[in-house]
Amino acid sequence: MHEFKYKNNQLYCEAVRIADITQKVSTPFYLYSYATLLDHYRKLVKAFSSIKPLVCYSMKANSNLSICRALVKAGSGLDIVSGGELYKALLAGCSPKKIVYASVGKTEEEIRRAVAREILFFNVESLPELELINKVAKDIGKAASVALRINPDVEPGTHTYITTGKLTNKFGIDFDAAYKIIQNRAKFSSLNFKGLHIHIGSQIIQAGPYVLAIKKMASFITKLKKELIGIEYLNIGGGLGIIYAQEKPQTAEEFSRKVLPILKNTGLKIILEPGRFIVGNAGILVTKVLYLKKTPLKNFVIVDAGMNDLIRPSLYGAYHEILPLRRTQDAGRRTNKVDVVGPICESGDFFAKDRRLPEVKEGDYLSIMGAGAYGFSMASNYNCRLKPAEVMVKGDKFYIVRKRDSYLDLVRKDIIPGFLK
Ligand code: PLP
C-alpha cells in the first residue's frame, strides 16, 4: 500500500499532483510520502503490539534526516552500520538507548564514538571485533553493551548479493563459536552481553526462512539458559520484502502470526530492524524523458536519471515499475518493447529492459516506483552527475528535504597540489 495514485489520470503523491512539483524542482528527484512511511512503521508496530518490540529502522535503506526524524518522532529506534550513520542518527534526535550498531568492519574510531555515546548495543560480528570493543571500552572507562550476531546458516531465498545468513557470507558468528565466546565472557571485563542478533538477508517475501532461523535461535537460547546466562534481547534483524512487481510478500500481520509464538517462548525483549519494508514503497524517483532513440534492434527511452541515482536495476537486475505522471487516453495500449536507459557511459545504465510501456514522448515525466529504499542511499556522483534532490510530501504540501547537488559540491573537496598550479 502506498499513497502514489492516479486522480483524473494525473499521478498524485498524497494530495499533491506530482507534475506540479516538476514545475518547481528539476528532475531527477526522489519523492517520499510521509503518510506511507509512517503507515508502514505503524503496521509493523501494531502487528507485534502484544510483545511491544523495539523497532530500529535500518538507516542504510534511506538515511535522509527527515525520514529518520519522522520515524524517530513516531517512536522508532535506529539500526546503524557506520560512524556516519551514528552521527546522522543522533542529529535526527534518536536516543542512543535506541541505537543498535552492526557491520563486519567497524573501525576503532567508530567503536570509540559509539561506546562514548552509550548506544543500546553493538551487534558484534567476530571475535577480534569483540576484543577491540572490550579494549576501547576499557580505555574510555565505560562498559559497552554487545549482542552477538549469529549466522544461523539459513537460505532466505533472495538475491545472492543480499543474502547474509549463510555460512558462506561474511556476516555473524556461527553457533559453536558464539557459545564458546559466551562461556568465556568473563574475559571481556568491559562488556555487557545483552543480546543475540540475526539478519538473514533482504527482500525476503516468505516467513519460512525467518521461522527456521528464529527456531534455531530459540534452541540456542534454551541451551544458553541451561548455563544460566542472562541475555535480555533477541534482535531478529530486518529483511521483510515489498512489492516491486508481482511479488506477494507476507504482510506484517502474516509475518507476526508465524513468528510471534516462537518469539514469545524465548522470554526475551524483541528488536526488529526493517529498512525496505518501511521506506521502499514510500518513495519514487521522478525523471524526464530526454530522447526517444530507435536503432535497428531497439527502442530506447533515454531519461535524465541514471544508475548513479538508482543503482538497483544495474546492480541486482532489480525490477521497478515505471509509470507516466500523466496517463493518456490510450494508456492501456502498450507500445513496442522499450529499454528505459540513463545518460551514463555504461550499458548497465538502465531502469527497464524490453518493457512494454504506455506511449511516451520527449519531455514527458516518468515515475520509477518503489525507489524509497536503497535508492538515494546508494546514489553517487559517477560521471560527475549531481545527486538528485529529495522531496517529501505531507498531505497537500511538499518540502525539499535535501537539495540537489551543485557543481561546487563536485569539486569542494578536490585539492590541486602546488606543483600543478
Ligand atoms: N539489519 C542489518 C544488519 C542489515 O544488514 C540490513 C540490510 O542490509 C537491515 C537490517 C535492513 O534490511 P531491510 O532493508 O531488508 O529490512
Image (cartoon, rainbow, N blue to C red):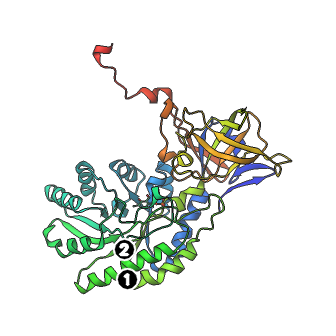
Q: Are dots 1 and 2 in contact, CB under 8 Å?
A: yes
Q: Residues within 10 Å of mark 2 (few under 14, many from 20)?
A: many
> Where in the figure is residue 351, as x and y percent of width and height?
62, 45
Residue that carries the numbered disc 1 in the rendered image: 266
Q: Residue at x 24, y 80 (%)?
A: 229
Q: Residue at x 27, y 81 (%)?
A: 224
Quadrant containing ligand 1 reads bottom left
Residue that carries the numbered disc 2 in the rendered image: 234
187 in relation to 356, above or below: below
Q: Dot 2: what SS?
A: strand
Instruction: Say if disc 2 is inside 8 Å of ligand 1.
Output: no
> Where in the figure is residue 341, as x and y percent of width and height?
63, 39
- For residue 315, say whether it is visible: yes
Amino acid under label 2? Leu
Amino acid under label 1? Thr
> Where in the figure is residue 193, as x and y percent of width and height?
24, 71
Q: Residue at x 32, y 49 (%)?
A: 83
Quarter that holds the N terminus: bottom right
- For residue 33, say whether it is visible: no
What is the CA distance from the residue labelled 1 to the residue labelled 2?
A: 8 Å
Q: Is residue 54 left or right of residue 101?
A: right
Q: Residue at x 32, y 14 (%)?
A: 420
> Where in the figure is residue 377, as x and y percent of width and height?
48, 47
Q: Dot 1: what SS?
A: helix
Comparing 292 with 55, the one in front is: 292
Q: Residue lying farthest right?
A: 329
Give the mark nearest the N terminus, 1 or 2: 2
Q: Quadrant of residue 153?
A: bottom left
239 in relation to 344, above or below: below
Comparing 290 with 345, the one in front is: 345
7 in relation to 336, above or below: below
171 in relation to 174, above or below: above
